[in-house]
Amino acid sequence: MLYLIHPKTEFMENIKFEKIISSKLNFRLKSVFMILFSLMVNLIFSQTPVNDDFTNAIDVTTIINSCSADAAYTIIGATPDKNEGSNWNNNGPKNNVWFKFTAPATGEINITVDRGDSKGTQRRTQLALWLADGITEIQSERYAYDNEDVTMGAVNLTPGIIYYISVDTQSTGYSGTFTLCLQDIVDYDFYEGAIDVTNIINNCSADAIYTIIGATPDKNEGSNWNTNGPKNNVWFKFTAPATGEINITIDRGDSKGTQRRTQLALWQTDGTTEIQSERYSYDDEDVIMGAVDLIPGQIYYISVDTQSSGYSGTFTLCLQDTVDY
């Protein structure tokens, strides 16, 4: 008996076969693509930053009094080397990267690791400044809250000498990108960077414009303070008015600021010879202090601190050219 295969049946079988072949081919192509994609992603995220090691520190002397490009640097994929800063809390280092600069003629440097929005994604930043050996610490600082820009300064550097900066985070999960900014003068965290507030005598600063959050100790504590410090003092200066008197108020609460347990002191020009000091009577008090017999035209210094870092916050500063009762 003779059986004939209908042309339509043969055609359908061919289509079915081609679909099977095509399906297998597509599956293999997809598999290859996924493998290549996975390898590419792993390669990107496993790459270490160029400045991962101390020996490959990026020279950032050229950005002093400026900033890097936004989010130009990262610690993602970095590995630990050398030491952690004494004020860090990461039991590390964890993922530190390195920079270096030649100290400017001022002998000062102010360093900011900037983050947030276009500036970068890093959180819980740790920052340290080192001598040229990369292990002798000059200064270190860390975040006060997760998303903080961390700023740190140093004075008495030797102009023309190279110093090193290391940047890390508290743990790998907070790694990200950041912007680096350098200035050749320190801010009011230091006596040398004291803000001149002569122009607010008989007035107040803007509300809550000042803070001691993240500040570091320098010079002395006031004789009436109870900090065993100083702890986180910041500095101001003013030219004594014609009255020869000054009344100083550290205002806080509501829109005025968050600081508590305030410590306040007035100093001669050297920043170490005390004229007067005062501290809080209760946690949320505005602290007021006055002085007489100042020499009109002479510069005097004010330092502000808190009893411990946990009470750090913002505050408003007010000055009057006559003392109160």
Image (spheres, grey):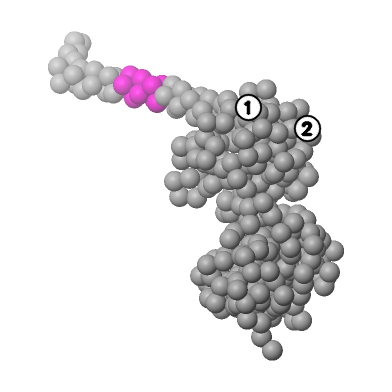
Find residue 135 and name its label.
2
**Front one among 79 and 208:** 208
Q: Position of residue 310 (x, y in %)?
A: 72, 65
Q: Main secondary structure of the magenta part?
A: helix
- Give the CA distance from mark 1 to mark 2: 14 Å
The amino acid at mark 2 is Ile
Relative to 15, is 193 above or below? below
The residue at the point 72 percent across, 41 percent down is 156
Q: Quadrant of residue 129?
A: top right
Badge 1 vs badge 2, beta-carbon distance below 8 Å: no
Magenta extent: 21-30
Count neighbours of disc 2 (C-alpha within 10 A) and say few if under 14, some if 14 to 19, many if 20 or more.
Answer: some
- Report helix, strand or loop for mark 1: loop
Relative to 216, is 18 above or below? above
The residue at the point 56 percent across, 31 percent down is 60
Q: Quadrant of the C terminus?
A: bottom right
Q: Quadrant of residue 230?
A: bottom right
- Report helix, strand or loop for mark 2: loop
Residue 316 shows up from this direction: yes
Relative to 46, is 190 above or below? below
* Residue designated by label 1: 57
Residue 175 shows up from this direction: no
Q: Position of residue 133 (x, y in %)?
A: 76, 27
Question: Is 80 left, or right, of 63 in this rendering?
Answer: right
The amino acid at mark 1 is Ala
Question: Is 11 left, or right, of 312 in this rendering?
Answer: left
